[in-house]
Amino acid sequence: MSPPKYGSERDTYVPSELTEAISGHVSDIGIRGAEQWLFVGSGGNPPHGNTVHYWWTKTIATSGVEPFKLHDCRHFFASGLISEGCDVVTVQRALGHHSATVTLSTYAHLLPNAEDRTRAATSSLMRQVSAADAAPMQHVTAH
């Protein structure tokens, strides 16, 4: 078996629904080989990239959906994290990017617009200042 990409490993935080789906897969299909892999290629090792591509292409063709690349699922995942409000470092770690710069250069167009956030923050500050200025005036009695 070869080490993970760039020889790195990472923790991946997954929801209970995914854990349950994997558990169901293990119960229904099982695990294979001495290393107990979910998906196995030749020799009981993880499948080679070409094998995964073949399986993916075959699955897409059989399903009848419009073709898309397996890597597109990674972009879908990243854009979903961003749309749910995850910060750049969280997305970087989830994807295993070696730096936030890689994440930003790939997904900056999906991040909330700085101008919109600035307008919203300024509006909030103005409401706070207006409320603070108005409060003392409410206690002034006319003579």
Image (spheres, rainbow, N blue to C red):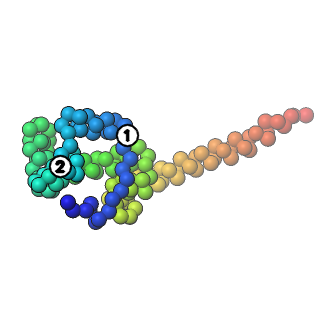
Kindly identify the residue that appears in the image at 28 percent across and 66 percent down.
6
Q: Is residue 39 visible?
A: no
67 vs 49: above or below: above
Q: Quadrant of residue 1?
A: bottom left
Kindly identify the residue that appears in the image at 31 percent across and 35 percent down.
20
In the image, 8 versus 44, the foreground residue is 44
Mark 2, residue position: 33
In the image, 140 versus 12, the foreground residue is 12
Percent x, y for residue 68?
17, 47
Kindly identify the residue that appears in the image at 56 percent across and 49 percent down.
121
Q: Amino acid at mark 2?
A: Gly
Q: Is residue 59 visible?
A: yes
Q: Quadrant of residue 133?
A: top right
In the image, 99 versus 106, the foreground residue is 99
51 vs 30: above or below: below
Callout 1: helix, strand or loop? loop
- Taking the image as shown, residue 121 lies to the left or right of residue 7, namely right
Whichever of labels 2 and 1 marks the residue nearer the N terminus, that label is 1
Percent x, y for residue 98?
35, 64
Q: Amino acid at mark 1?
A: Pro
Callout 2: helix, strand or loop? loop
Q: Quadrant of residue 104?
A: bottom left
- Taking the image as shown, residue 79 lies to the left or right of residue 90, namely left
Percent x, y for residue 109?
35, 55
- Taking the image as shown, residue 83 lies to the left or right of residue 139, namely left
Mark 1, residue position: 15
Mark 2–mark 1 Cα distance, whole angstroms, equals: 27 Å
